Structure formats: C-alpha cells, structure tokens
Image (cartoon, helix red, strand yellow):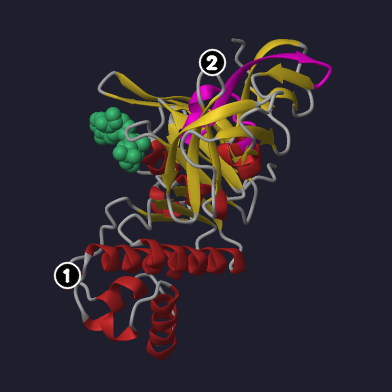
Amino acid sequence: MSTHALEITGLAKGFDGQGVLHGVDLSVRPGTVTAVVGASGCGKTTLLRLVAGFETPDAGSIAIAGRTVAEAGRCVPAHRRDVGYVAQDGALFPHLTVGQNVAYGLEGSARSTRARVHELLATVSLDPAMERRRPHQLSGGQQQRVALARALAREPALMLLDEPFSALDTGLRSSTRTAVARLLAKAGVTTLLVTHDQEEALSIADQVAVMRDGRFTRVGSPREVYLAPGDVFTAEFLGDCVLLPATITAGVADCALGRVPVRDGAADGAATLVLRPEQLVATTVDDGDQGERLGTVSSSEFRGRDVLLVVDLGAGEPITVRQHGIDPPGVDAKVRVDVVGTAAVLDERP
Ligand SMILES: Nc1ncnc2c1ncn2[C@@H]1O[C@H](COP(=O)(O)OP(=O)(O)OP(=O)(O)O)[C@@H](O)[C@H]1O
Ligand SMILES: [Mg+2]
C-alpha cells in the first residue's frame, strides 16, 4: 500500500482530440500542501477535476490514500472519493443561504452545526451575521470565502483548491490563506492548491509543482524549485533571475561575476548559471577602482521594500540586482557586484 495521500502516475487527458495533460506524475505526502503553478491554460484545473472525479483520464492512474480511484476503464465517482473541491468559479448553491451552503452535508444537531458554521465563517474572515444572505448578495471575494468554508466544513481527506484566494485583496488574502492553512494543517488535510501567485505558492506549500503545457517541469520543496529550478522556463516563472554563461571546474564557476561557488553536483564544463537578484549586492566603488565584478548602474527602480538595479558589466547581458531601498547606488554609479550563497546550474546545456 502506498504511503502517499495522493499518487498520480502517467496521467493524460485531452478534449476533442487535443491533448491537455501529457503524462503527469505527482506524489503528495499526507497532511502536506502542494501548490501547482503554471501559465493560464496549461492544464491545472483539468488536473484538479481529474483528481476530484469530474473527468475521466485517457491514460494513467490516480490513487487517493492508497486506493486507486481512476485508471483506464475504471473510475470511482466524485462523491465516493472523500475529496473537497473549491472550483475556480466558487459555484455556491444559489437558492441556499450562506449558512445553508456552509452547513451542506454537515451532520449533527442544529446547534452544533450552527456553531461550526460560525467558526468556519470566522476562519475565512466573514461576519457570522452574513449567514442569512444569499450568494447574489455577496461580493466575488465573499462568495469565494463561503465556498472555501463549505469545503472546509466536511474535513475531507484530500482538499483541492483552485485559486481560492484570487478575488481577495493583498491584506485579506494573506490573512485568509494563513487561517486556512492553519485549519488544514490542524485537521491533517492533504491539500492540492492551484495558484497564480508565485509568492503564495512558495510561502504556504511544502511542495511546489510547476506546470508547462500539461507537464510538470519541476516538483520539489519551495527552496529547491526556486533556487535550483533546472531549466530557464521554471527559473523565470518563479521570479526574476540572472542567467550567466560560465565554465565550471571542481564546484566553482568562472563567469562575468568572477569565481562563484555552485551548488553540489554540478559537472565540469560549459554551463548556464542561475542566480536570484537578491543574491547579488551592488556597492558603490571609486571611479578609479580596478578589479573583478565591476559595472555601472544603468537603471534603478524603487519599489518600496526593495530596489531593482540593472548593472551593466561591460560584457554580456546586463544583470538585475535586488537589494533594500535604503540609500542604494544611483544611476551611472560605478559598483562592485558580490554574490551571496551559491549559484545553481541549469540542467540544460548551453
Ligand atoms: N471541457 C473542455 N472541453 C474542451 N477543452 C477544454 C475543456 N476543459 C479545458 N479545456 C482546455 O484545456 C486547456 C487547459 O485548461 P485548464 O482549465 O486546465 O487550464 P488552467 O491551467 O486551469 O488555466 P487557468 O490558469 O486559466 O485557469 C485549455 O486550453 C482549455 O481550453
Ligand atoms: Mg484553471
């Protein structure tokens, strides 16, 4: 028996002869959160609908808590999978009140149900007085939170959330996701979360899976996928990055930034390095300074909590440096660029 809460193997799905998912593999440990990120139309919702049981795979298999729920010619119906699903469009029952929507499927006395409904509404930052309203009397973000509360109410073994916080503003979004993550963790619910927000994926997930055109390019811990993305697509999808041609000898890269240590396991020879802009620090030097890693600031973008500097190193592409915005080197300043930590090497050969 599998020890995984969810195990997906070779999953393929197409519509009208058009392939959407092309052999997706994913293992999720019990009680953890996996975030699925990827561009619009790459197949994220299709994957969730297959796991929920609303679509049948063309090939491959899905096992939930060691029980195969979908494989060629066999499919367990959605209501027998013990899965909670919050669809991308929320989809509340329009004829029921907020309270009835959240209580849907809950068992127990009217009193205990009401207490539970209030507790869940509070978790998603909604006033319990809203329980009497109907979905059309709510804003998009409020509807989204009611849908979330309804899915949380049943405490399923596996929770599927398709961009559940997308209609919320930044502050509410971060408090709601923290409260929801806490509730899921406390109840030991395994979660698959689709999000367009890379920072959200990296901050709340135990595992991040990056999808491109119906395939995962990288699956790993947030640190792994962010700091060692493997290919250019994954690197750029998760945030700004600096790509540098280099030659590697015994764990040290020779590149436009001088000698930079690389992460373990990089083979000797020509390679492309990936650094994140926050790994670089630009310090103003005197005009007459000679030496390595010198460049000129060609532009500076103040962004509040940090500043993005573009530094021209004289050869190759200019690089981006992200540092705190207190007294940064100005445009045209001569700077030395130092590297913090190690660089990752792309799996692709240049
Ligand atoms: N029922 C369907 N019939 C035909 N094509 C479909 C169907 N469902 C999805 N598709 C197509 O499959 C592709 C993947 O759709 P999907 O909804 O999985 O993307 P997504 O990654 O969730 O995108 P978004 O980030 O925009 O929500 C799209 O090209 C979409 O048009
Ligand atoms: Mg979608």
| Secondary structure state at the residue bearing disc 2 | loop
Q: In this view, does 147 lie above or below 280?
A: below
Q: In this view, does 270 lie above or below 27?
A: above
Give the residue at mark 1: 95
- Dot 1 surroundings within 10 Å: few (below 14), some, or many (20 or more)? few
Q: Going by the image, does 86 lie left or right of 199? A: left
Camera-near label (2 vs 1) is 2
Q: Is residue 82 above or below residue 267?
A: below
Rendered-image quarter of ligand 1? top left
- Residue type indicated by callout 2: Gly
Of residues 5 and 288, the one nearer the viewer is: 288
Of residues 310 and 78, the one nearer the viewer is: 310
| Residues in magenta, as a range | 227-251
Q: Going by the image, does 337 lie left or right of 160? A: right
- Assign the C terminus to one quadrant of the image: top right
Mark number, residue 1: none
Quarter residue 278 falls in: top right
Look at the image and say whether residue 241 sits in the magenta stretch.
yes
